[in-house]
Each structure stands twice: as structure tokens, then as C-alpha cells.
Image: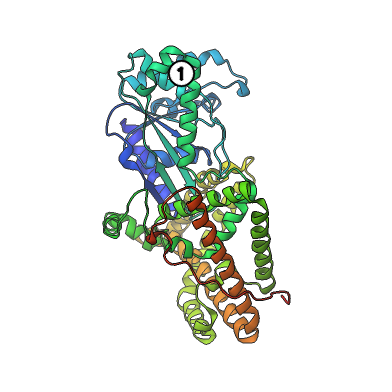
Amino acid sequence: MSRLYYILRKGLKFALELYFVDIQSSGTKHIPKDGPVIFAANHPNSIMDTMLLGACTSRQVHYMARSGLFKNPVVAWLFDATGVIPVYRSQDGTDMSKNQSSFERAYITLEEGNCIGIFPEGQNSNERRVLKIKTGAARIALGAEMRQDFSLGLKIIPVGINFQDRDQFLTSVLIRFGEPIEVKDFKEDYLEDERNTVRQLTDKIQESLESQVLHIEHDLVLEMSQMIVKMSAGELLRSLRKDEETGVSSAIRERFKRARGVRKKLLDRFRSVKRAPRLAESFNMQRLLSDALSYELLHTPKSFARRRAKLRTYQDHLKQTHLRDDFAVKHPVTLSSRKEAIKLTLYAILVGPVAAWGFLHNFIPYQATYQLAIRASDEAIRAMTAFASGLVFFTAWYALLAYLLWQSTGHKEIITALYILFIPFAGFVFLRYRQRVATWRKRILARTLFRTRTNLVERLINERDLILSDVHTLLVDYLTAQNKPIPSELFGPEPETPQATSTSSM
């Protein structure tokens, strides 16, 4: 690993940990410690994807990037210094014949036992869908092996980059590394028919990549799965405590938590945020749900339509009451409006001043970053725009404040440093404060509605339970149709189906 790449990786990794609540990875055991590797990843978030992939592997990744990015001389120098290889595309109006030299660089990089990172979709993709991939990754892999008479030992590792919310600050991301594809296994087919084997390997990469991503082809399935996940408030996830793919035990999870290190724990405290638990389990649950819905849409479209109608009706009823999907996490009868109001008041008195101070001192760079991000020409680069502009605006703003304070205090460095260091902490306190106030406000609203309109809230809860009971049946039926086992740990006992209640008065 080059010195410059190492320094950049360390700095960007820390910046990513500030930007995201959590960056989790699974399947890292599939990454060999040495030997040639091609990482073939989906591409939902522009340059952000390269940084996340690099942060989750200790090996240096030589990315293949479109040649247009090399037009800036500073960027071109940085890319050359970190081993980035240009790719010339017809849609960019460049000379495609130059790709021969790019392929040669890729071959040499792999022959030296290094790693290459490729985004075979060739462009930014939808957050929940893998586009039809190009043949470049397969051609490079087979070409490199052919040069060494298929003795190179090259592996292609599919990488799924899965965002909880691609455009949101302080969200989480899961990087999934799939089982390696052994390129040498395609030797006989390649010697017999090069063109067909390139297509065959490309299809294999496509299939493997889709298995590492929450790949949902139909927009209606995506819409419904997102609604069900929100309204379940973690209940479906809690039913998936045993992960069949990884066999993650509670003891392993505890060791994982302890291994997080002091720095990351302090960072969590500093930002006043909670990390997303077990993103891999959440991913598996959402994929199973979307697969079951896709199966229902294909085989029993009328049943799918009825389920969608029930979900939309339930969402309309929630809007009428100004409640949110997670209102039933704690049943309103268990809540005390007075207790929640007291908690909110005490929290506002004790934490409010720090949150207000953080809001005032971070408002200008935050707004500048936000306004620039929402004006991004492409939705897929919005998060990267926010990340990059945030680094610039916040750094410049803090430097300006430090200079003004240093001047006004008669060049007192310690006071200036302590003041400036407290500003980002107070900013994160404000973000957490806003979230908690909103939570307590929802609880007070739910309890108030329960006291004043008990029947309405009970009908909402009953309606919600009926939908979740139907979803449970859907998942079991889907697994049965696919001849997949349904272990008791997977769902537990089937929830009791509530008695249907009319909601026509809502």
C-alpha cells in the first residue's frame, strides 16, 4: 500500500465515520490477504462508493474510473499517485482505442498480486436496484488469466453497497462481500468460445452482485416493502434473530461490540447518536420480504393488489391522526402524557441551551452545505456533494471563528481551541435534541389521542396488527412454495390474528 493511499484512507475513513452513524461490513472473510482480486461493486452513490469500499478493506484498491475525471490536473495527479486507472467510454466522446493501454495497466496490476475496484454498471444506479452490468470486468479478468495460462489465481468478489438512506446525513451503510468467483473455472469455456464465456462470466457477476444488494426490480414491490418495514417498527427484524447465512451467535455479537475500540465508542458519545444494530439481519429481512412480495405479484396479482390497498388505507388513516408508523412501538395505554411532558421539559431545560448554542454556531455552514447538496445535478451524487462541501464549509467556518476569537481574546490559544472544539459537539447535541423532542412529542400525541379517541387508536392498532399478521402468512407461504425450511427461530409462533374492525369512520 502506497504511503499517500494509506494517509488518504485514514483521513477519509475518519471523515466517513463522522458523516455516517455506522459503517458495517459482512463477508470480509472472503477477501484474501494477498493475491489478485477484482472487487465488482454496485454504484448507488458516486465517488462515495469508492471511499466506503476502500474503508472496509485493508488492501489498496486500484479503481477504474472514467477518463473525464482526469481532466483536472490536480485530480489527475492524485489519481495517478493512488493507482487509479482511466476508462474511456463512448458516451463521453473519448477515443475508445486508449482502453487498450488501460487494460494493459489493469493486467499488470493484477499480475503483481494487487486489487482492482470496478463498478461494472458503468454509471450510478438506483438505490435499490442493480443495472445491467457491462462486460468490462469479465473481459479484464479472463484476459489477465489468459496471459498467465489461467494460473494467476484471480478472484472476483461481488460487493453490495447498501444505504439505509442514500441522501441522509447520519445514516448507516452496510457493505456486503460475497463469495469469490474463481476465474480459472472458466478456462475450458474461454478457450473454446471467448465471446460467449465473457457473457457467461458477466451473467455470473450480475447474479452474485444482485445477491449482495437489496435488488428490487418492481417499483410497487419497493413501495410496499418500505411501508411494511416502517410500520413493523422492528417487529419483523426481531423475529429474524437467527441469521441462517452467517450463523451469527450472541457471543460473536458481543465480541464484535467489544472490538469496536475506544475511539469509535467515544465518537458515538461525542455525536450523541446510536449505532444501527445488526444491519446484516435487517438486510436479510428486507430481502426476504421483497422476494415474497415479488413472488406474490407474479403469481397472485389480485392478492398483491388487495395487500397494497390495505397498506395505503392504513397510511391514509395515520395521516388523518397525524401519527407516524412507529406510534405503536409502545402502546399508548402504557404511556403517561404527564410523565412524557415532564421528561420533555427537563430535557429542554438541561440540554436545550447547549442544543441552541450548537444550532446557532453551525447554522451557516450547515445551510450552505444543504443548499449546495439539494442543487446537485444528479440525485446519486447528492450525498457526495454534501460530504465534500461539508468538509470545506465547516472547516472554513471553524477556521474563521477561531481566528476572530483568537484576535478578540488577545491571542489566547487554549481558550480558542476549547471553544472551537466544543462547536461540533454542540452541533451533534442539537441533532440528537431535535430527534428526541420529536419522539416525545409523538408519544404525547399518541397518549392524548388514546385518552380522547380511544376507539380510533385501538382500531388503528388492530388494523396494523391485521396487516402484520398477513405479512407473516405471506412469508411462510413464500418459503413453503420455495421448499425452504422454516425453523422455529425464524419467526417464532405465528401472531394471533386480531379481530377485524371497521375503520370507515376515520
Expressed as whole percent of the image width and height from the top left, the position of residue 141 reads 41, 22
Q: Is 134 rendered above or below residue 280?
A: above
- Numbered marks: total: 1
Is 361 situated left or right of 300 in this image? left
Q: Quadrant of residue 85?
A: top left
- Which of the two residues, 94 or 476, is positioned nearer the viewer here? 476
Q: Residue at x 69, y 75 (%)?
A: 502
Expressed as whole percent of the image width and height from the top left, the position of residue 13 reads 38, 45
- Which of the two residues, 184 or 61, is positioned nearer the viewer here? 184
The residue to which callout 1 is attached is: 102
Which image quarter is the C terminus in?
Answer: bottom right
Q: Is 77 rendered above or below residue 17?
A: above
Is 428 situated left or right of 379 in this image? left
Which residue of the protein is positioned furthest toward the right in this rendering?
505
Expressed as whole percent of the image width and height from the top left, the position of residue 235 reads 47, 65
Residue 105 visible to an observer of this rendering: no
Residue 360 visible to an observer of this rendering: yes
- Which of the two residues, 489 or 364, is positioned nearer the viewer here? 489
Chosen colour scheme: rainbow
Which image quarter is the N terminus in?
Answer: top left
Q: Quadrant of residue 503?
A: bottom right
Q: Is 215 rendered above or below residue 146?
A: below
Q: Residue at x 36, y 23 (%)?
A: 185
Tell me the element at label 1: helix
Mark 1, other Cα within 10 Å: few <14 / some 14–19 / many ≥20: some
Under mark 1, the amino acid is Ser
